[in-house]
Amino acid sequence: MALEAEAVAVDATGARSYEAADITVLEGLDPVRARPGMYIGSTGPSGLHHLVWEVVDNSVDEAMAGYASRIDVTLLADGGCRVTDNGRGIPVDPHPQYPDRSAAELVLTTLHAGGKFGGSGYKVSGGLHGVGVSVVNALSRRLTLEIDRDGQHHVAEFVDGGESKKPLSVTGPAPRGRSGTTVTFWPDPGVFEETEFRAQTVLERLQVMAFLNKGLEIRFTDDRPGRQQQVTYRYSGGIVDYVKHLNAPKEALFRRVCSYTQAEEDQEVEVALQWNTGFHESIHSFANGISTIEGGMHEEGFRKALTNVVNRYARAKGTLKEKEDNFEGDDIREGLTAIISVRLRDPQFEGQTKAKLGNVSIRSLVERATNEKLAYWLEENPREANQIVQKSTLAARARVAARAARDLTRRKSALDGAGLPGKLVDCQSRDARQSELFIVEGNSAGGSAKDARNPRTQAILPIRGKILNVERSRIDKMLKNVEIQALISAIGAGLADDFEVDKVRYHKVIILADADVDGSHIRTLLLTFFFRQMRPLVESGFVYVAQPPLYSTLVGKEKVYLKDDVAKAVFLEENPNHKAEFQRLKGLGEMDFHELRDTTMEPGRRSLLQITVEQAALADEVCSVLMGEDVDLRRTFIQTNAKDVRFLDF
């Protein structure tokens, strides 16, 4: 079904012609096969998992409509995925416009066919374009549809991107008289870069769905060899439980979670919020169960009303004096964790991936609900309200102090010329594309790295031990930290909202720390700093983690280096008769500079890991967990996310 190459007609003069015959018409599911990225975002891991979301969202729509109470998601041993719900089941009778085809087959094989346009099938739903499950069919090498409805079990099969192999037919009675829909699909390896589902990615999404749909039971099963597991999610508190879950690794400012709802004829809003003692806001918004990661009107209405309500309360109670400025929104949202979930009949999403909500009417509803319900909650809970106001006051003072500190930093840079830190051993090149900055722990490691470097392109910045944990430090305190100042000056592109990626002095900022637990902690702290204060640096692909070896051994007369215990175990498995001892390499400062250069710093032989935004965000989450210094919690988090935090060497 892929788009075929078009022949180009040429006229008598040799020029290219453009005639009616040059126009290609894509029919059925061909557009999806030709341009999959338009429908699922990409053909990488995110696009692969988007197939699961499309099928699960249909089942969740049944739950939101009040017809389904349970959803089962299974990763099959042969690489497929099965999603089952106990809803009404897709209609199986012939469609009035297409009497020779069942409604179910139309939904699976025709773009923009579904029960979410007319308004009678679903009052609210996550589907908008009617391309969800048909896209899954188009991008699967095989798909099986099973429908239990009206006491009968119906089955249809499709292959090779939507070709009908077995038309919908009754195969017997519905088991135990159940009703519902089961979709089993196997992604097409000719479309996707990889077809292996990641259990943790699926689990995280399913847990969010369970939080957003109070009382809905979602069961996950992984049947793949060596990965078998079963997890069940069901939350009677809904988004209140969601807020508690997000704040669990942190210290809540108070125990109560504020929550409120408000509904109109065609739309409703549900909000839950609680502050913690941290300094970063965490607002998650959803529309009809779909995560709107870029926000939209519902989030805009909440932010505006929240700022107004807290300022009015602070004025009324005398905390804000007549001549004092109002709190800014950032002051009030410092440490806030909030969930905004709206449901509406005709959501106006931007793009098929639905990242942003555009309905103006929902902004008004959220704003009214927050103005009324949150104001009432503050009056009814004066102790918690006072804690919110006091935290906002401290945040406002810190903001003013940070602005003064930033201005002072700019003035110093202007007076001192380049404003580079004294301990930076800079490189000769002034071409940022060729230049590399190695951040190393301590002066001894800095000395080894200096001797091992290529002075033309490699710069060395030693830092003293573990830098400040920016996850639990306000920006004014952070800017007073000597190590943070050195990092800002060396990279040379500013900080936070003032960061200008075009001014970055090095296109490779490499964290070079020891291959032990302390080194891992340092990497986590640095990645958290970059993620929070220099995110464009990460997004541009300029942040790397060097991976110095932990062991060396001799094979004959040749020295072999092994990254970690896993690499050592693999080596012993491949070389069972190896007799030479293993040398555990000590800190970088004690490594011979020849070893450091050959294993870590020399281009072509070194092992560098380019850090993605997702990995930096995970490091930030690890850092948040470390705030409590709760060993059990930390261990649980690391075990749960072991595949992703392997690069941190915990």
Image (cartoon, rainbow, N blue to C red):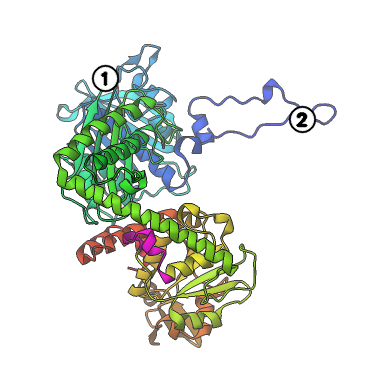
Query: Position of 453 compared to 398: left or right?
Result: right
Residues drawn in magenta: 470-482
Task: Classify residue 454 by image quadrant.
Answer: bottom right
Q: Quadrant of the C terminus?
A: bottom left
SS for dot 1? loop
Q: Nearer the viewer, residue 550 or 410?
A: 410
Give whichever of discs 2 and 1 has the lower sequence position: 2
Rendering coords of residue 80 (x, y %): 35, 43
Marks 2 and 1 close (CB-CB < 8 Å): no
Farthest right residue?
13
**Location of residue 472 with respect to 381 vertically, above or below:** below
Q: CA distance from mark 2 to mark 1?
A: 58 Å
Query: Visible in this render: residue 463?
Result: yes
The residue lying furthest to the front in this view is 323
**Residue beneath the point at 37% across and 27% down:** 347
Query: Residue 474: within the magenta?
Result: yes
Give the labeled residue for mark 1: 265
Residue, disc 2: 16
> Vertically, is 243 above or below 308?
below
Q: Nearer the viewer, mark 2 or mark 1?
A: 1
Question: Label 2 sits on what residue type?
Answer: Arg
**Residue at 34%, 65% in the rendered image:** 469
Q: Nearer the viewer, residue 19 or 385?
A: 385
- Percent across and percent down for residue 268 are 26, 27
Q: Secondary structure at mark 2?
A: loop
Name the main secondary structure of what is drawn in magenta. helix
Residue 627 magenta: no
Q: Amino acid at mark 1?
A: Glu
Instruction: Please state which of residues 601 and 527 is positioned toward the viewer in this rendering.
Output: 527
The location of residue 272, given as percent across then percent down, is 23, 40
